[in-house]
Image (cartoon, rainbow, N blue to C red):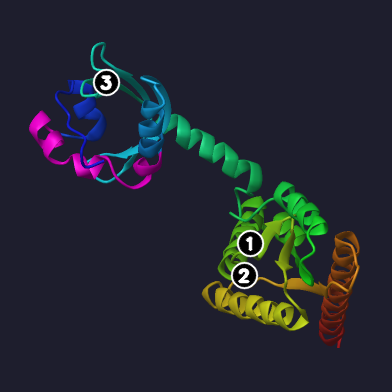
Amino acid sequence: MAEIRVIDVNRATLSLFGAPDRQTLLYRLSDIFRGEMEKPFREQLIDLWDGKIFQHREVVNYALDGSERHILLNFSVFPGYEADWSRVQVALTDITARKKAEAYLEYLGKHDVLTKLRNRAFYTDELNRLERKSLRPVSAIIIDLNGLKEANDQLGHDSGDAFLRRFGEVLNGVATPPNHAARIGGDEFAVLMPGADRQAAQAMVDTIHELLKINNQFYSHSPLSISLGVATSDPGESMESLMKRADINMYEQKRDYYAKKHAAVAKAKHNMAQ
């Protein structure tokens, strides 16, 4: 790459790479042709060796301010220079905006925009992948936000969305690969933990509660409450069975939460009546 010698460039190329003039661009070629450019450049040389003197490919260059430029590169060796490739015309088309749009669409396909967590499509694919893999055990955590419907009804959906975003921040803070956290329903979340035994799953549960406690300290006027169920796969158990057990455990905790809440309300009403 250090052997590249640019003879001339047009004004559009200067604009593309953010260069004030030709001299600056030529002096700083090493800032443009670097990093991810190495692999396609190597492929380009191999193609030349194989006699392909007309080429086009997508590459990554860098503007002089350090920002990425996704480029559609058209490359042709001038007639009469086929033997040594010493004169080449390169036409560059900036496709950065298109690549960003493609990346965002790919992100949307696997992520929940509101919480920044993985979405149900990813969750389903990951369950299928884990079903096919022999890696065991697998642990799963199913979580449901308590009181989200009441928050939506009493305070509006903006308040409910704020609750969801906050809990997304909590799960994004604890779930790092190979573990993944996903929003799988309106107020329901899942954490998948490949290769995690019961002890690791319990450590994850403890961490979730600890981060939730910290989050609630910043939002003491509207604390989040969750019901949580955890399960670790038994030998030969399917992912469907594992998730069902975690779901049942979550609903048991949710029933306990609402039973205690109703009892507290009833007690408060009784005290007021007295």
> Please, is residue 137 above or below residue 240 in the view?
below
Q: Is residue 34 magenta?
A: yes
Dominant secondary structure (helix, strand or loop) of the stretch shown in magenta: helix
Q: Is residue 250 magenta?
A: no
* First in residue order: circle 3 vs circle 2: 3
Residue 218 is labelled as none
Q: Which residues are magenta?
A: 20-39
**Residue name at image x 11 percent, y 39 percent:** 27
**Residue name at image x 21 percent, y 44 percent:** 30
Inspect this view and state whether residue 185 appears. Answer: no
SS for tag 2? loop
To which residue does mark 3 refer?
83
Residue nearer the viewer, 38 or 66: 38
Residues at badges 3 and 2 in contact (C-beta under 8 Å)?
A: no
* First in residue order: circle 2 vs circle 1: 1
Is residue 131 toward the left or the right of residue 7 in the image?
Answer: right
User: How far is disc 1 from disc 3 in space, using C-alphas?
Assistant: 66 Å
> Please, is residue 195 above or below residue 189 in the view?
below
Mark 2 or 1: the one toward you: 1
Is residue 202 toward the left or the right of residue 20 in the image?
Answer: right
Residue nearer the viewer, 257 or 247: 247
Residues at badges 2 and 1 in contact (C-beta under 8 Å)?
A: yes
**Disc 3: CA contacts within 10 A as few (<14), some (14-19) or many (>=20):** few
Residue 222 is labelled as 2
To which residue does mark 1 refer?
163
**Amino acid type at image mark 1:** Phe
Whole-percent x and y of residue 19?
A: 17, 34
Whole-percent x and y of residue 93?
A: 35, 23
Quadrant (top left, top right, bottom left, bottom right) of the C terminus: bottom right
Q: Quadrant of residue 247?
A: bottom right
User: How far is disc 2 from disc 1 in space, using C-alphas?
Assistant: 9 Å
Quadrant (top left, top right, bottom left, bottom right) of the N terminus: top left
